[in-house]
Amino acid sequence: MTDLPGVDLALNPEDVPFFDALDRGEIAVPWCVHCDDHVWPPRTRCVACYREVEEWRTLPGTGEIYSFSVVHRGDGVFAKRPPYVFALVSLDGGPTIMANVVADDLAAVAVGRRVRLAGPVVVESGRGGARFVLD
Ligand SMILES: [Zn+2]
């Protein structure tokens, strides 16, 4: 098993649409219509032009592993978990985000491997981040 352990994330209000999209099985990011680019991490204003972010765009939910770590030892709720993959995933048409990659064979996880969204990390309470599987 390679799912991340359950942890509660304290959400900022500007993060909520991202997690709402994850619950629907989608990836959505704030989009500056003036710069025609994503604003990541989510903010109410574009970091390039400082105008208000007016829309969110749904991305395909696919991407590739930019970098990753296989975590073998953790603390707290992570202490008794089996190894899991913590990755940076470069989204098609969007930013690079932190995510969990689930794979039956951890040796198959590699930089550049294609991944697709599997939904949110399952947590006991609260909300989890994005969880991907190998494509
Ligand atoms: Zn902008």
Image (tube, rainbow, N blue to C red):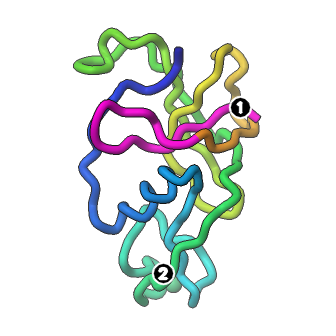
Which residues are the magenta region? Answer: 119-135
Camera-nearest residue between 12 and 127: 127
In the image, residue 129 lies in the stretch drawn in magenta: yes
Q: Residue 134, labelled with which disc? A: 1
Image x and y of residue 40, in percent: 47, 64
**Which of the two discs, 1 and 2, sits closer to the camera?**
1
Disc nearer the start of the sequence (1/2): 2
Image x and y of residue 1, in percent: 53, 14
In the image, residue 41 lies in the stretch drawn in magenta: no
Kindly identify the residue that appears in the image at 44 percent across and 43 percent down: 129
> How many C-alpha atoms fall within 10 Å of the one at disc 2: few (<14), some, or many (≥20)?
few
> How many C-alpha atoms fall within 10 Å of the one at disc 1: few (<14), some, or many (≥20)?
many
The alpha-carbon separation of the residues under discs 1 and 2 comes to 33 Å
Image x and y of residue 113, in percent: 74, 35
**In the rendered structure, which amino acid carries the disc numbered 2?**
Ala
Image x and y of residue 87, in percent: 54, 35
Q: In the structure shown, which secondary structural element does the residue marked by tag 2 occupy?
A: loop
Kindly identify the residue that appears in the image at 54 percent across and 38 percent down: 131
Q: In the image, is 64 to the left or to the right of 131?
A: right
Q: Residue under circle 2?
A: 48
Q: Relative to 38, say whether 127 is above or below.
A: above
